[in-house]
Amino acid sequence: LEDDEMETSDIQIFYKEESECQNLSQNSCPSSEVSHIYTPVKPRNYQLELALPAKEGKNTIICAPTGCGKTFVSLLICEHHLKKFPQGQKGKVVFFAVQLPVYEQQKSVFSNYFERLGYKVAGVSGATSENVSVKQIVENNDIIILTPQILVNSLKNGTIPSLSVFTLMIFDECHNTGKHHPYNMIMFNYLDQKLGGSSDPLPQVIGLTASVGIGDAKSTAEAVEYICRLCASLDTSVIATVKDNLEELEEIVYKPQKFFRKVESRTTDRFKCIISQLMRETESLAKSIFDEIEGISQIRNREFGTQKYEQWIVTVQKACTVFQLPDKDEESRICKALFLYTSHLRKYNDALIINEHARMKDALDYLKDFFTNVRAAGFDEIEQDLTRRFEEKLQKLESVSMDPSNENPKLKDLCFILQEEYHLNPESRTILFVKTRALVDALKKWIEENSELSFLKPGILTGRGKTNQNTGMTLPAQKCALDAFRTNGDKKILIATSVADEGIDIAECNLVILYEYVGNVIKMIQTRGRGRARGSKCFLLTSNAVVIEKEKINIYKEKMMNDSISMLQTWNEAVFKEKVLQIQIQEKVIRDSQGKVEPVPDKENKKLLCRKCKAFACYTVDIRVVEECHYTVVGDAFRKCFVSKLHPKPKSFGYFEKRAKIFCARPNCSHDWGIHVKYKIFEIPVIKIESFVVEDIATGAQKLYAKWKDFHFEKIPFDAKEMPK
Ligand SMILES: [Zn+2]
């Protein structure tokens, strides 16, 4: 159920997250956020303090709380940097933003601020990169705002030969510089140039963050080491924090009071009993057709209604799709049956999680929706049987969920907190964070249907990724939700998933409620940054003592981080630089020894089979790659293998026009295979590899891939000449 675990699906084939911002410029919902932050104002003393080492030309990480105006600090640094060049020389600044809303925001901030000073500002993001020459944009402008992947690509393909074209690089949310993040890819290039003895000048490097993080450090010594490694990645010589103007800072950024509330779960849960019984039955049905099911996964001691069960079922489902028998009809029958049993088990598990944190009614509605959809699709014997078993219990489930004595005590506590806070301050503005998207919907309904709370008029905000059941919000939809919360005083509460807590600027709110929600230390600091107004409070509400324990550990980690930074700031700068250099040399040796081995494509022709019913779909030799990331199949044979249905949400993107969804043509299967699009003048199917099983023709071995990029076969580019006239 976690957002990050359930990416992929057809939207990703087409609308890479970065591309969505195309819609943004034509955003029907006017955004109000730009103007209020950026009329040039007098810098505060602590902002001048933070900017100082960078103005002296030092590579700096600026670490200061969310909401203190780090963007303004970067404007000061940038302005000073561009003005310091003598006549005849020019500086060039690049500012990186990881997330699209931040990219958009920074682009307009920098334009507003610098264009009046006569500097040229431009930006390139994933959405605009295809239609512009990055090289020319970099050549013709003084300040360039980029999503980092653009620069990684341009360095790789040689459009930008070296980082020496820039004189200053600014990394927003620079704590991301690690592992294979594009920030680190850029810095690898920088460090290769630095350590490789090139005489070309390197740009000054500035990082901005609210929290450098400490990884898994268990002691201050380990935390110091972790921070040194981050500094090495960014070639940092100074960490700037506010020291001399702390009082002034604390007036601007108020830390909300934090409260922990341990609540009890239901003592008896009849809903859980009934669903667990259904799950046991479904599990034994699955076992009756395939008794080795227990041996598939390493996961032991699974319990219904947990994330662990979710992981178990996903593993089993994957393994079942590559299960093979000599009799292919028999194989198809068994694979399909297992697919259906595991899908049902997964839904039941979801429902138990909803039941745990919200109302029984919400969990039951979720299941009823699912069974309505099952009825509307293939509805074969197995599905009929499973539906009958559910319907036999339906009456009982209905009456259990209507029984007031089964109310969720956690919700009572949440209701109590909300009522009390709104009694104290009727103008309160609340953000309620929850773990999953299904819970966002459930809690919204609960508030709306609760006569004591319905005055809150809840809004919702979820991520742009797509999960297994719900399509995410688009960027314009996110902006609309945020604008409504900002400007409409009636909407007093915003229910959000974790994705909302980084990068998107949420208007001042004075009440943050974390509902069964826990994150790492970076997340915590940023969440806290949302409660800016004075007198703001943050509640952590959970039935799990471990969650409270974790949050206390996070607070301890934050202290360890602050202590470590203070310690590092007392080091002699030359000693620190030497330490950083040693780490950089070590890391480069490791990097170079690993090499960059491109995977060799396997030229052997392979079969693609429907992942659900195992019917033959096509051969890999018939697959063509369109615009480097979309996969179509040529030839008439394939057209008979699928059926298409008009897409509920047709969309255009670039040369593509999404028109229909395509499904396995076998009766009673109808597995989702991808979409049908108009590409230039051609009508072509676009398939997603996660819908298929790949079978080696010679050996019969089967493999699963979630993403095309992991499947290394000979990829032939799409050629219009091949297409029938
Ligand atoms: Zn099929």
Image (tube, grey):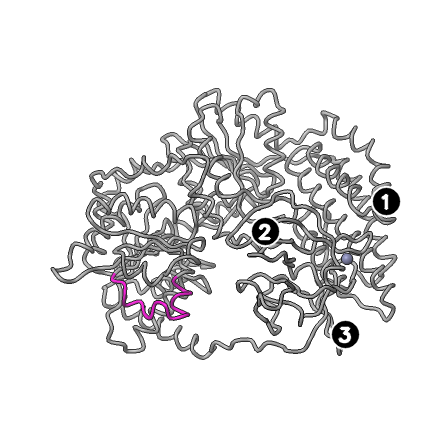
Q: Label 1: which residue?
A: 384
Closest to the observer, 164 or 665 = 665
**Point 39% across, 47% down: residue:** 102
Asked if labels 1 and 2 touch by Cβ distance under 8 angstroms, the answer is no
Mark 3: few/some/many CA within 10 Å (<14, 14-19, 20+): few
Contact? badges 1 and 3 (CB < 8 Å): no
The residue located at (74%, 41%) in the rendering is 370
Circle 2: is it few (<14), some (14-19), or many (20+) Cα within 10 Å? Answer: some
For the image shown, how many numbered marks are present on the structure? 3
The magenta segment is 151-167
Q: Is residue 640 above or below residue 714?
A: above
| Labels 2 and 3: the sequence-earlier one | 2
Asked which quadrant contains residue 606, the reply is bottom right
Image-quadrant location for residue 568: bottom left
Q: Amino acid at mark 2?
A: Ile
Indicate the position of residue 143 as horizontal and vertical percent values. Answer: 28, 54
Would residue 330 be found to the left or right of residue 116 on screen? right
- Name the image quarter holding the C terminus: bottom right
